[in-house]
């Protein structure tokens, strides 16, 4: 995948950013996930920095995700643990959005014994209790549908790839009802180390492009396999989650079912997704498998 650079942003959009914030002296490509487009820290003539994200509208995936970030940024409460949206434009060819930069922040270390882990879990728990989704928020079921469709393919067309775990997954999903996922909490839905920034006194969640409304325990549940992926045992993760008040209302069959769908989606992507991301997807899937087998006592 070819990554776009700031210099490839149309001149009128770059000019609009400069008019709003001042001349851009340097554009520093930022660490990014799998979403295409331009992601850069802009160094301005007054010595300040801002964070720019943008994509051409003919890239429907990137532009739709940025549209959701803009929608949410326009109504995110000031108390939310997220960088503030400073400006956005939805021109005819490109979509662009500028966020507050957190220059002294670093990505979270979620490995065992890291002091970041309790800080992150406490922040996610507080966020889940404090943030209410606006009425216009997409339902979590819209996001989960993408996972379910690939999970279904794995269970049918590619069942031979699941080995001895096939019956395990079917057993877990037999009791899963997507209605368990409904709720009024504003969910981030894609928390992992790269989307968590820490300063000495605060935890920020960034990249809200998958934000949706759902049950308050879901962000913690989707963080669980990420913790296992970096070295925590499933038992340790369950103990950590048990200390969070948002976790108390999580139906066990719903947690396990969501974990299975999450895992099967990543298994699908590990086998059939873009080559450059297959190794990472496989590692995430293996963490999910470990968690699910633990939860089901296997």
Image: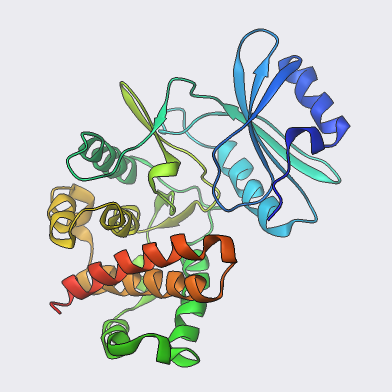
**Of residues 94 and 244, the one drawn nearer to the viewer in this rendering:** 94
Residue 90: horizontal and vertical position, in percent?
77, 41
Q: How many marks?
A: 0
From the top left corner, tell me how far across and down residue 213 is, in percent. Answer: 45, 55
What residue is rendered at 33% in x and 55% in y? 226
The residue that appears at 40% across and 49% down in the rendered structure is 191
Residue 230 x %, y %:
29, 51
Q: Quadrant of residue 27?
A: top right
Q: Quadrant of the N terminus?
A: bottom right
Front residue of 202 and 73:
202
Q: Is residue 297 above or below residue 39?
A: below
**Rendered-image quadrant of the C terminus:** bottom left
Q: Residue 5's spot in the image, x, y percent?
A: 73, 38
Q: Quadrant of residue 160?
A: bottom left
For residue 126, which quarter of the picture? top left
Q: Is residue 9 visible?
A: no
Compared across the picture, whether 3 is left or right of 73 comes to right
Q: Is residue 68 left or right of residue 187?
A: right
Query: Which residue is located at x 23 percent, y 51 percent?
Result: 246
Residue visible at 37% across and 68% down in the picture:
285
Q: Is residue 276 visible?
A: yes
């Amino acid at each position: 995948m070819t990554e776009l650079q700031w210099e490839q942003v149309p001149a009128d959009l770059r000019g609009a950013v400069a008019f709003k914030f001042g001349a851009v002296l340097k554009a520093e490509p930022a660490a990014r996930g799998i979403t295409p487009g331009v992601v850069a820290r802009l160094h301005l003539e007054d010595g300040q920095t801002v964070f720019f994200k943008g994509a051409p509208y003919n890239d429907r995936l990137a532009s739709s995700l940025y549209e959701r970030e803009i929608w949410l940024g326009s109504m995110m409460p000031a108390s939310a643990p997220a960088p503030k949206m400073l400006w956005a434009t939805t021109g005819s060819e490109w979509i662009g959005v500028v966020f507050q930069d957190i220059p002294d922040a670093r990505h979270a270390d979620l490995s065992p014994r890291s002091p970041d882990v309790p800080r992150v879990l406490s922040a996610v728990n507080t966020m889940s209790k404090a943030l209410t989704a606006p009425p216009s928020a997409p339902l979590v079921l819209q996001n989960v549908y993408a996972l379910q469709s690939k999970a279904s393919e794995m269970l049918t067309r590619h069942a031979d790839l699941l080995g001895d775990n096939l019956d395990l997954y079917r057993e877990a999903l037999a009791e899963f009802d997507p209605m368990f996922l409904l709720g009024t909490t504003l969910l981030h839905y894609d928390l992992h180390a790269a989307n968590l920034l820490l300063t000495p006194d605060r935890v920020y969640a960034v990249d809200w492009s998958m934000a949706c409304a759902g049950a308050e325990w879901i962000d913690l549940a989707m963080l669980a396999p990420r913790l296992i992926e970096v070295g925590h045992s499933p038992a340790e993760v369950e103990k950590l989650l048990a200390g969070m008040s948002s976790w108390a209302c999580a139906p066990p069959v719903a947690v396990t079912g969501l974990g299975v769908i999450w895992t099967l989606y990543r298994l699908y992507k590990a086998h059939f997704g873009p080559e450059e991301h297959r190794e990472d997807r496989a590692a995430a899937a293996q963490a999910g498998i470990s968690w699910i087998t633990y939860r089901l006592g296997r």
